[in-house]
Amino acid sequence: MNNITKLKNYFKNNLKENYNIGRLTWFKTTAFAKYFILLNCQDDLVFFLQNYPKDMPFYIIGAGSNLLIRDGGINGIVLKFSPTFNNISLLSEDTIKVTSSVLDVTVANFAKDNNIGGFEFLVGIPGSIGGAIAMNAGCFNSEIKNILTSATAIDYNGNITIFTNQELSMSYRVCSKATTHIFLEAQFKGFKKQKDEIALEMAKIKRVKESNQPKNFTAGSTFKNPTGNLKAWQLIENAGLKGYKYNQAEVSQQHANFLINKGDANSSDIEHIINHIIAVVLKKTGILLEKEVKILGDNLK
């Protein structure tokens, strides 16, 4: 029995072939994965890692909020945890345990309901906790490493390790274990705070986000902020690229560090704008912008 047959027998209807994975991203483009597997639990992931074809690439995705899949799709396997793996619990009066597929905003609301401060910024971050750990996500002067105490992760051989915050060596949009491990769950520690104060702070963050950032058919920030005083959006705007269009893709008029699918954009349209921005900003300023959005898959041949 070959490896793909083993996976089909084990996952049954949770394994799909030629699946439009692009529609699971916030850009809502069209791009197919050769195989797509929905994981219901940690044991599913362990089975996969012990049995998948080693000559076939695989990727695990979360909410798809900072992900672009190229038009040629993925000639491999894409994994995603199902909603049955969404667990969040209170360990103590200021400590929360969360599985990786729980949405960031859900964690923010859970902390609020339990009078725990320090999690308010998560209401401003699209995506799920696993992805937030992998990129040390942050906004409004806060980031995941400020509240993370430990994370449980599995390597590609199926070995599970619990890492402390320090062992993850997190820095701006970087987690040292993200390229070698898949995060399963994590523990976070905040501080006691009145629920109404937390709610006010979260409302403020949401107001700022809604007034400054586009809502539909867009991912999170396209580029990381470079070192120095200027933000990525300022560099893009100063380069005259706010509102720049290419076919059905556009640099947001609301916030220059966001790209929008105007309706029928394909992934190559969006990637064209990304590359154009990098080239123009580099030529004008000498600053090389680094992508925050993740790009996977192949170009059309």
Image (cartoon, grey):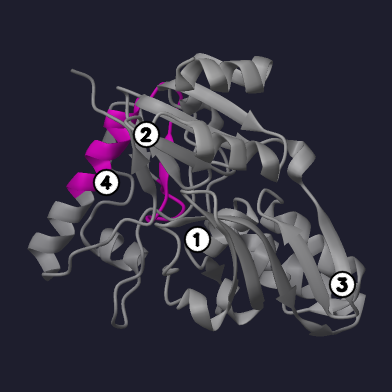
Disc 4 marks which residue?
A: 274
> Which comes before the other along the chain, label 2 or label 4?
2
Could you tell me how far apart the alpha carbons at marks 4 and 3 are, in whole angstroms?
Answer: 42 Å
Quick one: SS at disc 1? helix
Quick one: SS at disc 3? strand
Q: Position of residue 136 (x, y in %)?
A: 51, 68
Disc 1 marks which residue?
A: 134
Quick one: SS at disc 4? helix
Q: Which quadrant is the C terminus positioned in?
A: top left
Q: State which mark lies toward you, 2 or 4.
A: 2
Q: State which mark lies toward you, 1 or 4.
A: 1
Q: Position of residue 165 (x, y in %)?
A: 57, 79
Could you tell me how far apart the alpha carbons at marks 1 and 3 are, in whole angstroms?
Answer: 23 Å
Could you tell me how far apart the alpha carbons at marks 2 and 4 are, in whole angstroms?
Answer: 32 Å
Q: Which mark is residue 91?
A: 3
Disc 2 marks which residue?
A: 54
The kind of residue tagged 4 is Ile
